[in-house]
Amino acid sequence: MTSDPLERGRASYAKGAWMEAHEWLSRADADDLLDPQDLELLARSAYMLGRDDEYVRGLERAHHGHLDAGDVPSAARCTWWIGLNLLMRGETAHANGWWGRGDRLLEREARDCVEHGYLLLAVMLGAFASGDAENAAALAAEAAAIGERFGDRDLATIGRMDQGHALLLQGKTEEGFRLVDETMVAVTTGELSAIVAGIVYCNTIAVCQDAYDVRRAREWTDALTRWCEGQPDMVAHTGVCLVHRAEVMQLQGAWQAALGEVQRAGERLSQGVLNQRRAGSALYRQGEIQRLQGEFAAAEEAFRAASRLGFEPQPGLALLRLSQGNGAAAVAAIERVTAETEKPLKRAELLPARVEIMLAVGDLEEARGASAELAAISEAHPSDLLRAVAGHAGGAVALAEGDSRAALASLRSALSAWQEIEAPYEAARTRVLLGTACRRLGDDDAAALELEAARTTFEELGAGPDLARVASSAAPTPSKSAHGLSRRELEVLRFVAGGKTNKEIAAGLVLSERTIERHVSNIFAKLGVSTRAAATAYAYEHQLL
């Protein structure tokens, strides 16, 4: 091993030993040994260690060094990377200033070079920001072609990745994912520079999640995990990796492991711009799991912390309010956030909660409309996950409308999709509705089987609130009591005796609040009582619970 710090720094950089590379290159820099290309290596090693300010300062030094050496294209390339980092931090004007400088340098240079392709990506990002997916796709394809012409794999891969993303936004699913998968081949075979590989990993997984492609998101998250584990001193992308892993684990039902990944991500999420951009989503993920476990105070704290970081804590916070019995706050929150959201796939993240909340407060018309919109989005953007959420929502609405047979068909389709993508919690929630539909059709054996399967899953997951609801639903209900109460009226009476409001009972039984009011009135009349307390006392006295 040479004692030359510059050579040792270059060698360490080549093998992905970022801390060593940074230390040796910093020593060489102190001795004024770095040329502009080596300054870029020092800057990139700082980036991989999560030191973004140092990264930008290093690129600025390299930029000026390239200009002093008369290497205008390399100076222009530095402007692209500086601008991208600033853009990811939210410094849009500053980023545009650097990109404008790069364009001017290349115009003055007046020669064909690969850097034109990199700065074309800046224009493409503007098209994405304005919602012009068609133009973004064309610009990305042009950048990819420039990269291929000059043999620049980084540029060609970024271009193909963004072209695939733009096609997915246009609903061209098969074509878009073909490009996405091609992009990931370049990453997993080690053809790309470290920074580009990390960006492509993180962006591609996010694209797969946005397109509701669970299988691809899982596959590439596993690949990202292996890539991160091969670089133990890397900081730049590891926080993002841990958040992606937590999202996958939550869907698979490994809730405690998911919380562990979020907690591990905590320190890393404060370092590096890509990590910092996911800090809010990590807290939201934590809050969602805590909400499902019934830890409402902790969930609210996590949602508030996510909001302080600029992350919209919906629909989780609205569903938390519903669980706390505050239907009005839940409605206000979900109506506000859906009104502010225009893109169909983003609305699809909110519509299932809108259906659940509107059914809970008895607004069947709003629930029906949200379910229909969700079904339309699922048709336009086919995926097992969207099919599952749309089927669950449609089944819940059909139950509220009293059409149990239509509900069964929709819920069976949803359950099949949940099982295919290995989502046990969501499958269990669908089985609760299936049990309700079977019981209404008189098939008590099938109802008991569905509810038992759901209860087992909720117990394994620690889903306290769902476990309580399914326990109420699974309680034996004779067809007629000695006092003339129907099966449904006995169910409602049990909720009344448990101190539940009509809104809470409606949510638990997936009925409208108006229907519950009618059942309560009938119970009072049949039992000869006039208050909920008297009905509860009667039920205990006559062993109706």
Image (cartoon, helix red, strand yellow):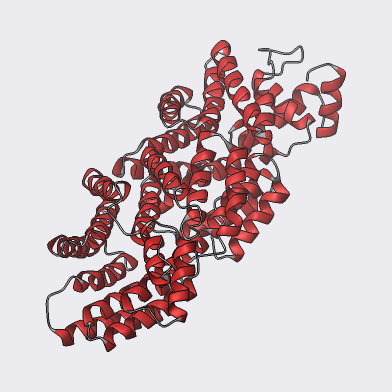
Residue 287 drawn at (x, y percent): 62, 49
Residue 254 vs residue 503: left or right?
left
Residue 243 percent coordinates (x, y): 52, 50
Relative vertical location of residue 127 with respect to residue 290 in this rendering, above or below: below
Q: Answer left or right for 430 relative to 513.
A: left
Count of numbered marks: 0
- Indicate left or right for 531 with 105 as reference: right
Residue 277 visible somewhere in the drawing: yes
Q: Position of residue 71 (x, y in %)?
A: 22, 82
The answer to which image quadrant residue 526 occupies is: top right
Would you say residue 531 is visible in this rendering? no
The N terminus lies in which quarter of the figure? bottom left
From the viewer's perspective, is 403 left or right of 95?
right
Estimate the x, y position of residue 386 in percent, counting from the top left.
Answer: 39, 39
Looking at the rendered image, the quarter that the C terminus falls into is top right
Up-down relation of residue 249 to residue 85 (above or below): above
Between 377 and 264, the one nearer to me in the picture? 264
Where 8 falls versus 255 (above or below)?
below
- Picture residue at 76% right of the left edge, 11% below the top: 482
- Taking the spot 30% from the left edge, 79% from the top edge, the residue there is 99
What residue is at 69 percent from the left and 56 percent from the top?
Answer: 301
